[in-house]
Amino acid sequence: MNLLRPLCLLSDAIRRRARRKRMDPGQALGLEAEDLAHRLLQSKGFTVVARNWTAKSHAAEIDLIALGPAGLAFVEVKARATGEFSEPERQITPEKQRKLAAAAAEFRHGSQYRSTPFRFDLVTVILEPQLRLAHYEDAWRVREALAAHP
């Protein structure tokens, strides 16, 4: 058994409790979902190289940028407290995809990952009544996203 895992889970629980006391509930939910997505990606062999990366052009914020066996993944994390009203993946609009594609191009241009293969992934999180995490690899194509109407 990995001894680091219980410490990570305890750290997450402490951070979650502190966030809920001092933050807007929606913001706390988003950060908790990003923590869960980060751990999920790590368990799949990814190394998160950036978190909440904002383009200088302010095109968009990329929740997680992770390096995996197949290259770089620009990861959008979407969460819901419950799955009662709609699924989190329904929040990814063509406009959001276009903005993320532009931000990803800006990140790649200014980094050591300029020639690294890349894709766009989506991680969805539903917290209750039972935690559900889903990782959609290669969730959309950059060409399609850039072709979306501005």
Image (cartoon, rainbow, N blue to C red):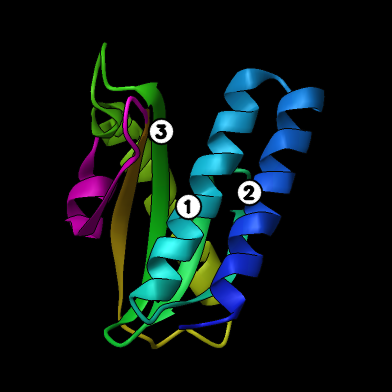
Is 118 or 41 nearer to us in this picture? 41
**CA neighbours of label 3 inside 10 A, class few (<14), some (14 to 19), many (20+):** many
Mark 1 or mark 3, which is nearer the start of the sequence? Answer: 1
Task: Tell whether label 2 touches label 1 (CB within 8 Å).
Answer: no
Residue, x 44% and y 55% (percent of image)? 37
Q: Does residue 69 lie above or below 64 as drawn?
A: below
Q: Can you tell which mark lies on residue 57? A: 2
Q: Position of residue 124 (x, y in %)?
A: 32, 42
Image quadrant for the C terminus?
A: top left
Identity, as a three-letter code, of the amino acid under mark 2: Ser
Q: Which residue is mark 1?
A: 36
Identify the residue at the far top of this view: 85
Q: Is residue 5 left or right of residue 85?
A: right
Identity, as a three-letter code, of the amino acid under mark 1: Leu
First to last magenta residue range: 128-150
Identity, as a three-letter code, of the amino acid under mark 3: Ala
Q: Nearer the viewer, mark 1 or mark 2?
A: 1
**CA neighbours of label 2 inside 10 A, class few (<14), some (14 to 19), many (20+):** few
**CA neighbours of label 1 inside 10 A, class few (<14), some (14 to 19), many (20+):** some
Residue, x 30% and y 50% (percent of image)? 122
Q: Does residue 42 lie above or below 30 as drawn?
A: below
Residue, x 44% and y 73% (percent of image)? 42
Q: Which residue is mark 3?
A: 79
Q: Is residue 62 visible?
A: no
Q: Is residue 85 magenta?
A: no
